[in-house]
Each structure stands twice: as structure tokens, then as C-alpha cells.
Image (cartoon, rainbow, N blue to C red):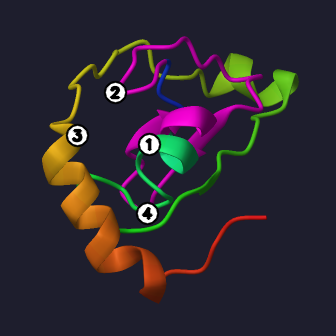
Amino acid sequence: MLEIRPNCEHCNKDLPNTSTEAMICSFECTYCKTCATDIFDNVCPSCSGNFIERPIRPSKMIKKYPASEISVFKPKDLEKAKLNSEEYKNILPKNR
């Protein structure tokens, strides 16, 4: 089950369960859409996977299965992330 992390790991923007700006990779690294697409070029700076839009858990289920309250804030080294993006961006599908 998805943790539904509450913030962008890079810029710390709030990303509540209802956010349409949340992007995740296969390891659930969580970034806002701006960081994921504009800064990291759709390549996760942590695991080199691609990003997809995080689904929204329905309100009747969020009560039973609440979103995580644990913030992960680890701004990335942009030079290192750029090299990572350059290496992997062409082998990953682009989000629409």
C-alpha cells in the first residue's frame, strides 16, 4: 500500500493526499511535479527510475488507511542529479 508521503523531498512543498502535483517513482520517492519534470527531467535522483502521478486515495479509504505524516526532506545535489538525468532520461518513457 502506498505511504502517500506528505511533501516533496527536494523543495518541501506540501503534497497532501488530494494533491494532483505529487509524483512518485517505484520506490515511492515523492516529488512535486515541478521538481520531477523540470528539475530532474523525469528521472528520480535517488533511484534513477521514472516518475508517475501519485494516485489519490479516496476519502472513505483515507480514514481507514491514513496517509503518512512522516516528512522526507532531502534536497538533492543538482549537479549530480543533472548527470543522473542525462544518463537515464532517454531510456525512460516520458509522462504525458
Q: Which residue is mark 1?
A: 39
Residue type at mark 3? Leu
Callout 4 crowding tier (Cα within 10 Å): few <14, some 14–19, many ≥20:
few
Question: Does label 2 or label 4 sit earlier along the sequence?
Answer: 2
The answer to whether residue 66 is magenta is no
Residue type at mark 1? Ile
**Residue at (44, 25) in percent of width and height:** 8
How far apart in space, not on screen, are marks 2 and 3 (Cα)?
A: 10 Å
- Residue 47 vs 36, above or below: the answer is below
Q: Is residue 20 left or right of residue 44?
A: right
Farthest residue toward the bottom?
A: 91
How far apart in space, not on screen, are marks 4 and 3 (Cα)?
A: 21 Å
Q: Which residue is mark 2?
A: 10
Question: Looking at the rendered structure, which numbered label has been put on residue 26?
Answer: 4
Of marks 2 and 3, the one in the foreground: 3
**Residue at (27, 19) in percent of width and height:** 73
Q: Are marks 1 and 2 in contact (CB under 8 Å)?
A: yes
